[in-house]
Image: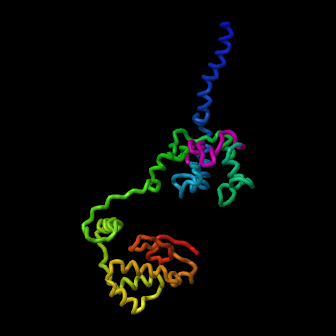
Amino acid sequence: MLRGCLILVVPVALCVGLQPQHARADETSPTAAGVEFFEKKIRPLLVMRCHECHSDQGKGVKGGLHLDSRAAILSGGDSGPALVPEKPDESLLVEAINYPQDGVQMPPRGKLPQNEIDLLTEWVRRGAPFPAGEKKSDASKRRGIDLEAGRKHWSFQPLREQPLPAVKNATWGERRMDAFVLEKLESSGLGPSPAADRRTLLRRLSFDMTGLPPTVAEIEAFEGDTASDAYARQVERFLASPHYGEKWDASGSTSCATVTSPSNGRSKRGRTPGSIATGSCRH
């Protein structure tokens, strides 16, 4: 009975002992010949053909794939590991540079010369040797989506009333928003422009909404209207006018903004000139 137990234990022990060594197979130091082959044939090729889109020194890393360290190459990008050492037929890198008809083709500007394809294929066949101690790119770590960090982004925070900032000119402004605008102006050493007279104010509004100046009668009526909601009623009048926005229809390209009536806080979507637009759209 004891002999049978020993027979069972020995294979298990051998497997347990061999597993870590197998796991470190890809981390063995390259041979001198392998490093020489990489430095003379492969590194110049990667720098010339690949690093523009797949290294921190390039214009930006495409597809999450770095090709500037062995760890990054083995870790791969959005499509998985870029290569399988000693197995070019199973390596995405080798597949891509051979320009498969129904697969990823790299580099995108055109297929590499055949001698360069052969060099990269041979490099993978040799186990993709890379100089030992080469600095690993931090970006070589596989990146996932950090949901907890994403939830902290300001756009996902619940709406809540913010405390008003401290400003020097506390008498200026009519709405809560004005305090935030003023705080930014004062921090830059600026201040609000002087209030426009009624004639100027109506002309600005009329040009913005219809592209035409107000009539003399409209100016006189507005100047004689001393009610606190006089301007708000002018905004509502222009928004209700059939001529509102006509001037932008001619070009076919408009800017979109939200105009808020001071009288009731209601917002209406409409076309406005670029000077007061909050976004752009095309109709």
Residue 45 at x, y = what percent?
Answer: 62, 52
Q: Is residue 151 above or below residue 183?
A: above
Q: Is residue 189 left or right of residue 159?
A: left
Rendered residue at 70%/49% (across/down) = 95
Q: How is the image coloured?
A: rainbow
How many discs mark residues in the rendered view? 0
Q: Nearer the viewer, residue 191 or 262?
A: 262
> In the picture shown, does residue 41 fall above or below 259?
above
Picture coordinates of residue 189 (x, y %)?
28, 69
Residue with the most extreme bottom position: 216
Q: Is residue 238 visible?
A: yes
Is residue 195 rendered magenta in the image? no
Residue at x 62%, y 30% (from the top left corner): 22
Residue 256 or residue 270, whichever sits in front:
270
Residue 135 on image: x %, y %: 50, 43
What secondary structure is the magenta-colored segment mainly? Answer: loop
Query: Which quarter of the picture shows residue 191?
Result: bottom left
Query: Bounds of the magenta span?
Result: 68-89
In the foreground, 158 or 266: 266
Q: Residue at x 37, y 82 (%)?
A: 201
Percent x, y of residue 170: 25, 67
- Whether residue 41 can be seen here: no
Locate the C terminus by quadrant. bottom right
Q: Quadrant of the N terminus?
A: top right
Residue 4's quadrant in the figure?
top right
Q: Is residue 74 magenta?
A: yes
In the rendered image, the residue lying farthest to the right is 101
Q: In this orientation, which residue lies closer to the viewer: 233 or 177?
A: 233
Q: Which residue extends farthest top?
A: 1
Residue lying at 65% horizontally and 44% vertically, measured from the top left: 83
